[in-house]
């Protein structure tokens, strides 16, 4: 590298087309690598939850397993609290998608509002999950009193940890949007965050259906898996 050539550069002047083309190619390559990395992460998350669900179905065939729904005294026979939590996560998913659309249209204020709302509703979801844990413990459904209880705490904790990881990334994106304002370069990372958010919503819907299933449904699913 020639230091005199570097010192003589004038970055405030228009750059040659070749330099701009190289920058665009570099950005496209980085975004492609990020998409591949996200697919790899989602594949790992899928395997993790798939294995836990399989062990849940296998453990459900033992006599000491008592499902959390089916009888009036069981907490998820009325899943209204879970529906409320699901609504919070769905609003977070919708908000981040709104932020992506706003970023593509270079609407800075709308993008910040969408992303900030996504963070807010995700935090509310996590707090609502903690409140649900406290509610179950107040009813006597402790983590070690029933295998179904243990799986509820385990599955929701793992899901919450994945959501926390996404929040760290999304918070960083919020600050980048706020300080840089380069929405043309951030729409790609925002879309990756949105994909991760939608995926976690889908995972939660599967967990919701599983945890609120009656014993007959759980037994049928276990039989389908060969347990």
Image (tube, grey):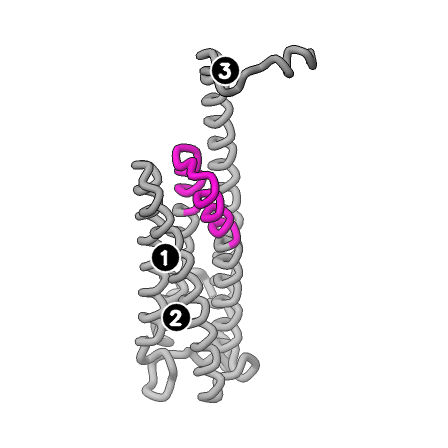
Task: Determine which residue is flagged by label 2.
Answer: 218
Residue displayed at 50% across by 15% down: 19
Does the segment drawn in magenta span residue 182? yes
Instruction: Considering the whole magenta stretch, tell me its main secondary structure.
Output: helix
Secondary structure, mark 1, is helix
Which of discs 2 and 1 lies nearer the camera? The answer is 1
Residue 45 magenta-drawn?
no
Quadrant housing residue 87: bottom left
Query: Reading the chain from its start, which is encountered first: label 3 or label 2?
Result: 3
Q: Earlier in the sequence, mark 2 or mark 1?
A: 1
Q: Which residue: 36% across, 78% down?
A: 76
Please state the horizontal and vertical placement of residue 217, each as a whole percent of the image. 34, 70
Distance from Cα at disc 2 to Cα at disc 1: 36 Å
Query: Where is 105 relative to 173, above or below?
Result: above
Relative to residue 46, is residue 22 depicted above or below? above
Camera-side residue of 4 and 93: 4
On the image, the x and y values in percent for residue 200 come to: 42, 55
Across and down, in percent, residue 205 comes to 36, 61
Front residue (pair 144, 90)? 90
Task: Mark 3 vs mark 2: give the one in front.
Answer: 3
- As helix, strand or loop, the secondary structure at mark 3 comes to helix
Q: For mark 3, does the 10 Å Cα neighbourhood hold few (<14), some (14 to 19), or many (20 or more) residues?
A: few
Magenta residues span: 168-193
Disc 2 is placed on an element classified as helix
Report the residue marked by disc 1: 117
Residue that mark 3 sits on: 19
188 shown above or below 75:
above
**Cα distance between the residues tagged 3 and 2:** 60 Å
Residue sitting nearer the eye, 4 or 199: 4
User: How many numbered tags mark residues here?
Assistant: 3
Mark 1 or mark 3: name the one nearer the start of the chain: 3
């Amino acid at each position: 590298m020639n230091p005199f050539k570097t010192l003589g550069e004038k970055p405030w002047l228009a750059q040659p087309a070749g330099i701009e083309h190289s920058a665009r190619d570099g950005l496209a390559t980085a975004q492609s690598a990020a998409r591949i990395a996200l697919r790899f992460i989602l594949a790992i998350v899928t395997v993790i939850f798939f294995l836990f669900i399989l062990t849940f179905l296998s453990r459900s065939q033992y006599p000491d397993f008592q499902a959390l729904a089916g009888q009036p005294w069981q907490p998820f026979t009325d899943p209204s609290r879970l529906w409320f939590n699901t609504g919070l996560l769905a609003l977070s998913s919708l908000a981040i998608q709104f932020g992506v659309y706003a970023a593509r249209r270079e609407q800075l204020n709308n993008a910040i509002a969408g992303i900030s709302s996504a963070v807010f509703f995700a935090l509310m979801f996590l707090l609502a999950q903690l409140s649900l844990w406290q509610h179950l413990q107040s009813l006597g459904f402790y983590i070690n009193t029933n295998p179904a209880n243990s799986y509820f705490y385990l599955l929701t904790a793992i899901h919450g940890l994945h959501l926390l990881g996404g929040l760290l990334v999304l918070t960083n994106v919020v600050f980048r949007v706020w300080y840089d304002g380069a929405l043309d370069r951030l729409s790609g990372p925002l879309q990756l965050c949105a994909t991760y958010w939608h995926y976690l919503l889908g995972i939660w819907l599967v967990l919701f259906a599983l945890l609120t299933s009656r014993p007959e449904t759980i037994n049928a699913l276990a039989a389908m898996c060969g347990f």
